[in-house]
Structures are given as structure tokens and as C-alpha cells.
Image (cartoon, rainbow, N blue to C red):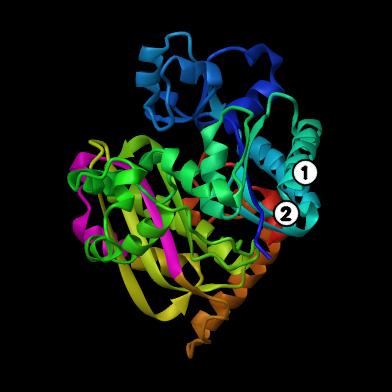
Amino acid sequence: MPRIIMHIDFNSYFASVEQQANPHLRGKAIAVAGKAGGDIHRSVVTTASREAKARGVKTAMATWEAKKICPELIIIPGDPQKYSEITERFLTVCHKYADAVEQFSTDEVFIDVTSGAGNYFGASILALMIRRDLKAACGSVCTVSIGIAPNKLVAKLASESVKPNGLTVVRPADVEDFVKSRPLADFCGIGRSTEKKLAELGVTSVATLRQLPRTQLINLFKSQGSWLADASHGLATDVLENDNEAPKSIGHSYTFPHDLHTIPEVKKNLLAMCDRVAWRLRGQHLVASRVSVYVRYGDFGSDGCAKLLHIPINDGLTISQNAWALLSPRLNLHRGVRLIGISVSDLKATKPPTSLFRKDRRMSRVVHALDVVQTKFGQNSWHRASTVSTKFLERTSGWHYDHLAMANKT
């Protein structure tokens, strides 16, 4: 039976949540940026309200640039706990109506409504019911755009086609024409570099993309070439990924309130970040065999590298030691470290191998005991002596990894 897939996307998510929470912000140009207590002048716009977008303010724009374009812009520091609460309400509503739910990001999901809807008319009725329930659960300011189609690619294109508060239905017979009408930049999977490379080939629209032979696209773009050929005709998967599927990587990045210029500063912050990554690893009963580290400098230049490990790990100190071994030879402190990112991948659901050394086994028991403490009292319930002075302000990400609520879930 052909699937009926719905894509639901919040409009100006963080900004609309702030306007819902504070009536005095409604109808005004606002932008969510940075962290509570942080320097907003070192931040970028995470989300702009509709009013701010109308003035030219865009996501990822530097806050100083946004203020220059829109002097009356009100910049709000992000509140991850608030957004996470709304996301939970959002998902609860979606699960009520869906056969399957795939969370695509903090503020958007794909849901399979095939059996619940029966047909596209039924799917439209479900969309209106979902919109009604979201209004009750999240507030009238928090609107969504909804796309309904035979697969994920077209459903997302449909929801993007009418904003804000749109509802677009693309039936199977209309897919080819609808896809042809959309600009290449709207396709999730065609980034700037791909779009630029296509333009060099004279491909500036879906119509011209369709004219390129599949074999030529595969030669030029490898595996993505086959996807491009299919996408130009609206062909894509209708299978939703399981929300409970193990993550492919776990990471943490942080932009510091001031640039770091000394090795001790970098090492202690790196260790504190690695402890957070390790905490999440162990919370999901995973170990990692690859460590990646990334650094951005004060001049906005960046560098990064990765290492494959022979023995899988899940403790912060070992992750930090491997990350520092990667980073230290290429670190340029004269440029000032603006941001550090740490990530682990090649994840497996297993326990790390038992060490032959008594000291390591004793440390493993200590880490387990500390996990019990964190599960009960939260992320910040203990600190290493070397990292006690570090303090990470909350990020505007919509996820509360750093909160007690996350600890209770894992």
C-alpha cells in the first residue's frame, strides 16, 4: 500500500516560543541568540521572528549584523529547557495520530499516517486535528507548516512551500509537476557546494537537472548522483527511521565568552566537555571507537582531526587524552580559541573491555558510582578538581543535555 507521509515544521520555532511565553514580544522583531548570561555580541541568530525576517534578519547571521539591519531588533538569550518542553508536547501530539514518528530536528518531524488517514482527504483532516491539538498544547503563536505527500522528500518540500501556517497536499499524480516547480535550494540534500557544482554544469532548476543522464550524475557526484536523479522526479524513501535507533555520533561544542590563549584553559575546558560526552555515552550504554576534535579561532579560521581507536572507550578522561593528543600538535593559541567541539563515533552497544590493571578497574567503579549520583542529582552534581572553575552556559539547541531531566531519561 502506498504510504502517506506528513512533514510538520514549526515556524520560527525558538522565536515563536518566546513570543508565546511573553505577550509583550508579540508583533515585534525579535531574535533568539546565544546563551543566557553570555555575550550576545559574540553570538549568531538562532531563530528570527516573522517580523525580524521581514526586515532581512536571517538564521546564522551575526547579532551585530542583525542589529545593523534592524536596529529595533530585540535579542533574547536562548532557553533550552523551555524549548525542550515544547518539543516534548509537540512529539506527544504527533504520536497520538501517527503510525510511526521520525524526529528530524528539534522543531520538525515526519509522521506516517497511512493507516490512520486512509487517503489524502483523511490525511488533510488529520493535519487540521494535529494543528488544533498543537495550538492547545503549545499556544496560538506557535504555528506549524504541514506538507503531505507519498514520501519524505516531497512532504518536506511541500511544508516548505507555504509558510507560515501552511498546509500543502501533493498527491502521487501531482509529484512530478510539484517537484519541477521547486527551486534546487529547497531540496534537503542539495547544499551550497552541490548547488554551485550543478550551476557550473548549467543546472539551475529541476527541469535542467532532469536532462542530465543518471550515469553522468553518478560519475560527477558518486552516490549522491543517483539520489539527485531520483529526487528530480520526486522519488525518495517513504520509510521513517526509528526514533529509538542508536545515534551515529555524540558530541558537544561550545563557544567561549572570551578567546582562550593558554594551554591550561584549553585542556580543562576540553576535559569538562569530554566528561559531558562520556556521560551521554554511558547513559545510552554505548562505547566509541573514534574521537574527533574541532577548534575555531578568534579570526574564524578552523581546524579539526579525528582518530580511530583500537580499544572502545566511554570515560571522559580517556576521551580527553585522545582529543588532546590530536589537537595539541596543531593548536595555534596566538589566534585565540573561540570554540571547541568534541565528538565520538563508531558507536556500539556494549561495555568497554575490562582492564588488566587494578587501578583502571577501581576507576571504572568510581565512574559508575558517579553516574548514579548524576542520574539522581543531575549533570552538575560533581566536578573534577581540575575543571571545577569551568562553567558552560546553556545552549539554544532545544535539547537539555545539561539538565537533570536528561539525566533522568537516560
What is the three-letter code of the residue carrying label 2?
A: Val
- Write down the quadrant of residue 396 in the picture: top right
Q: Which residue lies furthest to the front in this view?
A: 173
Tell me residue 152's x, y (percent): 56, 53
Q: Which residue lies furthest to the bottom in this view?
A: 356
Q: Nearer the viewer, residue 402 or 247?
A: 247
In the displayed structure image, the side of residue 366 where residue 329 appears, left or right: left
In the displayed structure image, the side of residue 7 where residue 386 appears, left or right: left
Q: Tell me which label, 2 or 1, sits earlier in the chain.
A: 2
Which residue occupies 36% across, 58% down? 229
Answer whether residue 16 is magenta in the image: no
Q: Nearer the viewer, residue 9 or 262?
A: 9
What is the three-letter code of the residue carrying label 1?
A: Leu
Question: Above or below — where is 22 with respect to 342?
Answer: above
Q: Name the residue under label 1.
A: 126
Q: Mark 2 points at which residue?
A: 113
Tell me residue 41's x, y (percent): 39, 24
* Pointer 2 with pointer 1, Cβ within 8 A: yes
The 10 Å Cα crowd at callout 1, few under 14, some 14 to 19, many 20 or more, is some
Which residue occupies 28% across, 40% down? 204
Image quadrant containing the C terminus: bottom right
Report if residue 278 is visible in the image: yes
Q: What stretch is highlighted in magenta?
A: 323-345
Give the Cα separation between the discs numbered 2 and 1.
8 Å
Tell me residue 101's x, y (percent): 68, 56
